[in-house]
Amino acid sequence: MASCRLNFTPNLWSPSDSPRLSSTCQLQTPIPSHSHSSHATLKHFLPSKTSKIPSSTARRRCSDAVRSHMTMEEKPISGDKMLVYVPPHPLIKHWVSVLRNEQTPCPIFRNAMAELGRLLLYEASRDCLPTVAGEIQSPMGVASVEFIDPREPVAVVPILRAGLALAEHASSILPATKTYHLGISRDEETLQPTIYLNKLPDKFPEGSKVFVVDPMLATGGTIVAALKLLEDRGVGNKQIKVISAVSAPPALQKLSEQFPGLHVYTGIIDPTVNDKGFIIPGLGDAGDRSYGT
């Protein structure tokens, strides 16, 4: 599966091959492929404050430029930069489209969120799960094998409540994981986060891999609050993978400034957030649409 790996730095954001780009693009030499995936990098200049959706002409020009420069040349990536991954798998695009549709009923919406989470978790875990090698007896002979090492700590942290839907299939994708629930609500007026449930341990085991699942990265308040809780418990930025359905520049900007080395996996990057803190075009309130309340 191809995976578009995007280098995100302060005052720069890195969308996928989606046409939702602003009028100014700058291509960067693509980074090398790894394992079974090919990667391309796009640097995109973002004005410090904007709420305008780019013109269709500019989007087409930038989109064409991205497609025409997706090559396999080598370029090292600094470990100090946040990376944003937008896997260009057609199933990811399909489930994002189902989620966007305002006519999608609650049960189908929740199922689409779960399927999207399955695919994003698969991509995010591609290069970070510890394995143990050995030999087993197959019906036809001895075979060399590798299993996920159950002794190495892997944790999933869904941010309630919409994170529960996106993380529904985590246990089938990530063997031997522990799930720690984190409830964070957002004030509709101030857009500031409030923690109402915290099931995180006082300290995570050394070397833990942590997948934080938050469907909507809009203003960034919720995800920043969650990552600071992990930081207080000894989890480094490079040990964390953030999983989201839809992301927007304000949240990605905050993450890149405060959590260098972080990796974010998202279904799509939308261009803006409105004055009520909702991603545009987004998919609405993910919690309300997942559970009908």
Image: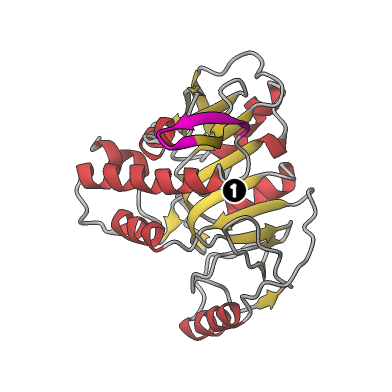
Report helix, strand or loop for mark 1.
strand
Left or right: 72 as drawn, with respect to 104: right
How is this picture coloured? secondary structure
State the image coordinates of residue 32 (x, y, percent, origin top left): 70, 64
State the image coordinates of residue 162 (x, y, percent, origin top left): 38, 37
> Which residue appears at 41% of the width and 44% of the height?
117
Residue range (magenta): 130-141
Residue 217 visible in the shown view: no
Q: Using the image as rendered, state which of residue 34 and residue 286 is in the foreground.
A: 34
State the image coordinates of residue 197 (x, y, percent, origin top left): 47, 19
Per the picture, the main secondary structure of the magenta-coloured stretch is strand
Mark 1 = which residue? Answer: 264
Q: Is 137 within the magenta?
A: yes
Q: Using the image as rendered, state which of residue 129 and residue 205 is in the foreground.
A: 129
Left or right: 260 as drawn, with respect to 61: right
Q: Using the image as rendered, state which of residue 250 and residue 75 is in the foreground.
A: 75
Q: Is 56 within the magenta?
A: no
* Image: 86 above or below 147: below
* Image: 293 above or below 205: below
Residue density around tag 1, few if under 14, some if 14–19, many if 20 or more, within 10 Å:
many
